[in-house]
Image: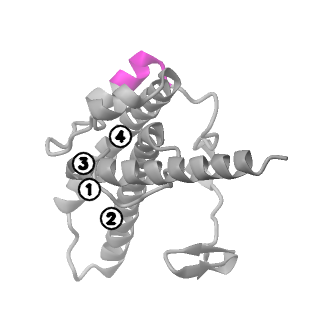
Amino acid sequence: MFKLKNKIWTKSDEPKPWFSTEDLKNLPTKIYSDCMLSKAERQKILRSEPRNAEVDFKPPQMEQYFLRAMSKQQKEFDKIIRNISYRTSAVLRPIDNIEKALSESKPDDNDLEAKTGYDLLRRSNQNARELLRDALSYANDLRRDLALKAISPAHTTIRDKKGVFGDKLMDLVEEENARSKLYNDVNKEKHRFFTSNQP
């Protein structure tokens, strides 16, 4: 049991899983290892999937203010997350192409069977789009937290702010600097207390 947006989520809420039948028996089910495409295979797929011209697939660049404060390891980790995000964003191509095709081929409202199948397919495709955007946003949050910890060891995770930092950059910097100062002041007080109370 766990909490999801103020709702207690139990196993009974989980939709019943389905099992592959007929043609779906050949559907690959291994998703975490030994699945990487060759560069040629990946390019072949991308060439067959036109991209949505209104989507910027490149992940946000890290602001220079934070890059100057980040260690070599932190910069490398940020680069890894950014590259994974960019590679994952390509999934949006077939999703949006399916959405475009569906929007151009709506069934007659009188054909209830066709309309039911159409609505299910469109809903599942839109769910896939939202889950992908959620994953990419989560990766961006990881990058932001990594950068904020570079300037403030006292930083705790903050969610629901745009971009890597977007227009809230200076507000966040001031907030983290204040928190860092408080963190350092507390440590100094602890050190002074223990030093003055040594036998």
**Contact? badges 4 and 3 (CB < 8 Å):** no
Name the kind of residue labelled 2 in the image.
Arg
Q: CA distance from mark 1 to mark 3?
A: 38 Å
> How would you rate the neighbour count of disc 3 (Cα within 10 Å): few for under 14, some for 14-19, many for 20 or more?
few
Considering the whole magenta stretch, tell me its main secondary structure.
helix
- Amino acid carrying mark 3 in the image: Met
Residue type pointed to by label 1: Glu
What is the crowding at mark 4: few (fewer than 14 residues within 10 Å), some, or many (at least 20)?
A: some
- Tell me if residue 166 comes above or below residue 104 in the rendering: above
| Residue visible at 33% across and 64% down in the picture | 122
Which tag, 1 or 4, sits closer to the chain's start? Answer: 4
Circles 1 and 3: CB atoms closer than 8 Å:
no
Residues under labels 4 and 2: Cα distance? Answer: 20 Å
Q: Earlier in the sequence, mark 1 or mark 2?
A: 1
Name the spot of residue 29 as percent of width and height, x first.
63, 44
Residue 180 included in the magenta stretch of the image: no
Q: Which residue is depicted at the point 37% across and 59% down?
A: 130
Q: Residue at x 42, y 22 (%)?
A: 41
Question: Badge 2 is on which residue?
Answer: 122
Using the rendered image of the protein, determine whether residue 108 is visible from the camera's viewpoint: yes
Magenta span of residues: 37-43
Q: What label does residue 170 carry, if any?
A: 3
Where residue 112 appears, as percent x and y from the top left, is: 31, 81
Circle 4: element type: helix
- Colour option used: one colour
Residue 62 visible to the viewer: no
Q: Which mark is residue 89?
A: 4
Question: Does label 3 or label 2 sit earlier along the sequence?
Answer: 2
